[in-house]
Image (spheres, rainbow, N blue to C red):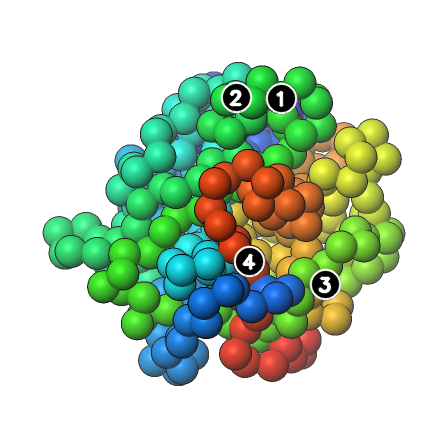
Amino acid sequence: MTRLTRLTRLLAAGTAAALTAVLLVAPPAAEAAATRKTSFTPASRATITPGVMAYTAGAQCTTNFVFTDAVGGVYLGYSAHCAGRGEATDTDGCRTASLPLGTRVDFVRGGSVVSGGTRLGGGRLAYSSWLTQKRLGTRDAAACAYNDFALVKVDAADVGKVNPSVPFWGGPVGLDTEGTAAGDRVYTYGNSSLRAGVSALSPHTGISLGDDPADGGWSHPLYTVSPGIPGDSGSAFVSADGKAIGVLSTLGLAPLPASNNIGDLAKELAFAQANSGISGLQLVNGTEPFSPIL
């Protein structure tokens, strides 16, 4: 497995065929309600949703789900490696350096900054599984490799722009805690700018290869029609019944070429709830019904 912090690094190295996986970060170009209920803008008017791009110190990723805390704070999830500072071969989140909490994150939709940039607002890195595992001295190899989850807190001035529904598909309708079996259908929405703005390529559907018994359920390998590409990292994955199941982390090149791996959201969220210091952290359900029709 190899980390991809810049697409050009991988191309220049000429080593793609030898790599087992790459983390999908590209260069620039609720199961239960929170203690305090947050009102969200209708999906038709929202500009900050799952699938919006998040730019962090020169790298881009795709956000996944919306979360809230006990006092009404609103967060978007993405991959911890999106704020990583390592090289292309650094995939161990327990060892790889990361940007600090409080780092500025800008939200971009359709090529335009909708929050942050030269404007006020945006978000700040509020939690990183990579930073937290290093702080705790985590030694579990599977967790270090696959617990790849971070939270960006949306500026209070921009909360009125947020809707928690996954674009195109709708949902989520809850948190999946059962993992996947081989052949299970999954749904995702990746919006990398490397697709040159072709939004029709953003919704994907795919098939799970089942839980990987070697990592204790932390990772789920799968194939999707139009695999995730750099910049899709962090994307939301939902199960066939609309539950939030995972977060896109890596692109597999061998032994399963063009496959992807998603981190198990139930495990990642439970770890964050126990160790982030964010009181009342919960996944938020979408306001739009889940509709698995392509």
* Residue placed under numbered mark 1 in the picture: 138
Q: Residues within 10 Å of mark 4 (few under 14, many from 20)?
A: many
Quadrant for the N terminus in the image: top right
Amino acid on which disc 4 is placed: Gln
Point out residue 228 in the picture as x, y percentages from the top left corner: 57, 49
Mark closer to the observer (4, 2): 4
Amino acid on which disc 3 is placed: Ser
Mark closer to the observer (3, 1): 1
Residue situated furthest left in the rendering: 118
Point out residue 74 in the picture as x, y percentages from the top left corner: 40, 60
- Of marks 3 and 2, which one's residue comes earlier in the chain? 2
Q: Residues under labels 4 and 2: Cα distance?
A: 23 Å
Describe residue 48's horizontal placement relative to residue 286 as left or right: left
Q: Residues within 10 Å of mark 3 (few under 14, many from 20)?
A: many
* Residue placed under numbered mark 4 in the picture: 282
- Of marks 4 and 1, which one's residue comes earlier in the chain? 1
**Which residue shows up at 70% across the image and 23% down it?**
140
Q: Nearer the viewer, residue 116 or 177?
A: 177
* Residue placed under numbered mark 2 in the picture: 134
Label 1 near label 2: C-beta < 8 Å?
yes
Q: Nearer the viewer, residue 255 or 293?
A: 293
Mark closer to the observer (3, 2): 2
> Mark number for residue 239?
3
Q: Residues within 10 Å of mark 1 (few under 14, many from 20)?
A: some
Quadrant for the C terminus in the image: bottom right
Secondary structure, mark 1, is loop
Secondary structure, mark 3, is strand
Q: Residues within 10 Å of mark 2 (few under 14, many from 20)?
A: some
**Which residue shows up at 52% across the image and 53% down it?**
281
